[in-house]
Image (cartoon, rainbow, N blue to C red):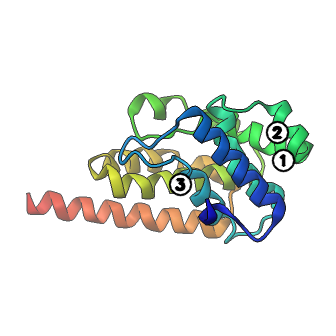
Amino acid sequence: MQALLIEDDFVSSAALFTARRYALAGHLRRHNGESFIHHPRELAKLLSGFPHNRDVLAAAWLSRPLQEAYADAEEIEDCFGTKTAELASKLAAFNLPDSCSLPALAKVEFAAIRNAGPVLQTMALAHLFVLANTTAEYSPEMLAPFAKWLRLHIHTFNQANTRLIEKVSSWLLETEQQEFVLEDAG
């Protein structure tokens, strides 16, 4: 639990709230049986490298338990306020995947993302980038199809943080180049 704590008490409270919800639900990672808290933690960590406020980081922690129905928006609003609850609710409404399976990817609400503002687009793109890194580590066979899917939809995030778009675009280029190298070797 110590690894979840952050310097800001508000964000720490969101991290602990999420950890408790995941523990109560028995939500474990398919790949190694560890707590699934990794994804919200990595999302908050990535977002902390871009312009943000504590509501953004708290919502990064809270959107996944909201999407998984381990918490509801009213409870999040009672604990963390209206702004954080709205951010978490809107991010959860995008139906961002927790895996790279085609059925999960097909559920993403791109129209809602396209109509969202810069903060939410940044949060959504960061979520997908964290998923890409997790996929590279635990399901490398899914990485190429996921990268192709993300490449098709990257234009949807035109209002996201420019540095994040560049980071994701660079990763997509590297992934594509690695794929060509593997095809040439095969």
Measure how far apart labels 1 and 2 are at the Cα level: 8 Å
Q: Residue at x 65, y 33 (%)?
A: 67
Is 118 above or below relative to 30? below
**SS for dot 3:** helix
The picture places residue 177, in percent across and down from the top left corner, at 29, 65
Query: Tag 1 or tag 3, which sits nearer the N-term?
Result: 3
Q: Which label is found at residue 84?
A: 1
C-beta proximity under 8 Å, tags 2 and 3: no
Residue at the location (64% across, 61% down)?
4
- What x and y, as percent, mark residue 34? 44, 49
On the image, numbered disc 3 is attached to which residue? Answer: 38
Res. 121 in view:
no
Q: Residue drawn at (40%, 45%), measured in percent from left and top?
A: 33
Q: Nearer the viewer, mark 1 or mark 2?
A: 2
Q: Quadrant of residue 175?
A: bottom left
Q: Quadrant of residue 90?
A: top right
Query: How dense is the environment of label 1, judged by Cα within 10 Å: few (below 14), some, or many (20 and up)?
Result: many
Q: Pointer 3: residues within 10 angstroms few (<14), some, or many (20+)?
A: some
Q: Amino acid at mark 2?
A: Ile
Image marks 1 and 2: residues in contact by CB distance under 8 Å:
yes
Residue drawn where x is 66% and y is 32% of the image? 70
Residue 2: image location, x then y, percent: 63, 65
Task: Identify the image quadrant of the N terminus.
Answer: bottom right
Taking the image as shown, residue 152 lies to the left or right of residue 139, namely: right
Residue 76's mark? 2
Which of the marked residues, 1 or 2, is nearer the chain's N terminus? 2
Give the Cα separation between the discs numbered 3 and 1. 20 Å
| Left or right placement of residue 178 versus residue 105 in this view | left
Report whether 135 appears left or right of 61: left
